[in-house]
Amino acid sequence: MKVKREKWSKEFSKWFDEVLEKAELYDYGRYPLKGTGIWRPYGFKLRQNIINIIRREHDTRGHEEVLLPLLIPEHFLRKESEHIKGFEAQVYWVTHGGAEELDVKLALRPTSETIITPMVAYWYQSYKQLPRRFYQIGSIFRYETKATRPMIRLREVTTFKEAHTFHDSFEDAERQVMEAIEIYKRIFDELGIPYKISQRPEWDKFAGALYTIAFDTILPDGKVLQIGTVHHLGQNFTKAFEARIQLKDGSIDYMWSTSYGLSDRVVATLIAVHGDDRGLVLPPKVAPIQVVIIPIPAKDETKTKEIIGYAQNIKEILASHNIRVHLDDRIEITPGYKYYDWELRGVPVRLEVGERELTDKTVTVARRDTLEKKVVELNNLVSELNNVFKEIEGYLKKRAWEFFNNKIRMTTSLDEAIKIIEEHGGIVELPWCGDLKCGLEIEARTGLRVLGKPLKSEQVDVNGYKCPVCGKPAKTILRLAKTY
Ligand code: 5CA
Ligand code: ZN
């Protein structure tokens, strides 16, 4: 196999930082503000293509995009008591306007429940106006105290997609939670990103939520990253902001709400799970450049000019079929160096055109994922490329899921759980009685982080298994991991 993934897994952190820099995606660590990154043009385009998928999946399922203020008056942020308890330590405060000290301190929003809920209280009075689903994509700020990492743990999260929905019953909000899970599955499936869905334990739910459902993935180093969360907020925020409606039977009650979020971590994960030792490998769907054409100069100069003309002709054909194509006609650089350069940047397909291709009216097609090459007739190029794009997407998704599934193991013993994570990383699953106390005990005795239990819809067979702490029959499984 030509494809190597050694550095990618063994020195993932270094691999990741180098790819961001060398592929000119994202500048991190040089701007003198921890937890803040700069999207460079190539990275910005990749991010934009991913955002387009996120937007489409929300828009087509009844969500409406909004734009909310970046600042929250202190008393608003404090209205929901659990929420502020959870976020207090992470809030950035604006205290001055010019030289003047402000009467009311302003928080840079860490998330927007306390902005949209009071507004919705003005907008809707009747169950007839519900449900409503809103979302915003923008920056939020969190003064993270754990080690910050590019795209993965930011203090300014620049690609925060937060959805906020409002309902006339607990059940309708719960239905929305399930709908949100389906939306997130579609987004991750489309990007070929593997995940497990777990209900977070009580002690790790979102501040102000009734319960939290999380999507977790495994990065190449075996550590788990939370890549999305869906929260049932009950009436906690609507009570705090007196968001009341009239129900069908004429009575007045508070609305019910949910929220769910994604971030720059989606982009980070896409980069991480599909990469290899040569660098980035992008699915054609989101690649800023899907095809790069490399002309191979001939000995004779007029031949070379013909080759470049042929390459330009190919470029026009592809562009007219809406393929994102780039012709690398730099003359001072050798084809070999160009191969290396575009491989690093993850361009899914490279076309090589030289003397032979010119004579035969063919093109050599090289795949970034498998590094395989084949010769294709110019007449069939567009349809061939569209097939190759699908093949690449299929291959990347399959390879990512194989890596992921291989890192999920079941055991019945706590010692074994520790050993498995030490040796393989990933996620370990233990039978569990469902008791919170046993869950906390498992977390304390293994030193691992509890991810939670699977949803009821995910069938797990724990027949005959016992909880490793209390010895009672297991009702479900508990997932544990080392996490980011
Ligand atoms: N208001 C809710 C739903 S939008 C909320 O804020 N949920 S959250 O806190 O869980 O954040 C949503 C997602 O953002 C998380 O699942 C995680 O994937 C991502 N995220 C959270 N904090 C950061 C951070 N500091 N850097 C990058 N991504 C983050
Ligand atoms: Zn137990």
Image: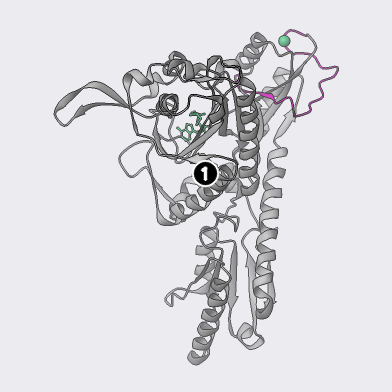
Instruction: From the viewer's side, name the closer residue of 399 and 323.
Output: 323
Q: Which residue does the numbered mark 1 point to in the structure image?
A: 268
Say which quadrant the N terminus sits in: bottom right
Looking at the rendered structure, the secondary structure element under dot 1 is: helix
Q: Quadrant of residue 54?
A: top right
Mark 1 Cα-neighbour bin, 10 Å: few <14, some 14–19, many ≥20? some
Q: Residue at x 53, y 33 (%)?
A: 132
Of all residues, the one furthest to the front in this rendering is: 250
Residue 21 vertical placement versus 434 (above, below) = below
User: From what the image shows, is residue 86 above or below residue 142?
Assistant: above
Location of residue 472 by image quarter: top right
Tell me if residue 281 comes above or below residue 317 in the rendering: above
The spot of residue 229 in percent (x, y) is: 56, 31
Quarter occupied by residue 475 = top right
Residue 479 appears left or right of 80: right
Towards the viewer: 206 or 57: 57
Residue 242 coordinates in the image, percent (x, y): 44, 17
Please give the range of residues in magenta.
Answer: 447-471
| Image x and y of residue 237, in percent | 47, 19
Q: Quadrant of ligand 2?
A: top right
- In the picture, measured across the screen, residue 31 lies left or right of residue 233, that is left
| Amino acid marked by disc 1 | Ala
For the residue pair 410 and 363, the one nearer the viewer reads as 363
Q: Where residue 32 appears, x then y in whole percent?
A: 30, 40
Determine if the magenta segment contains residue 451. Answer: yes
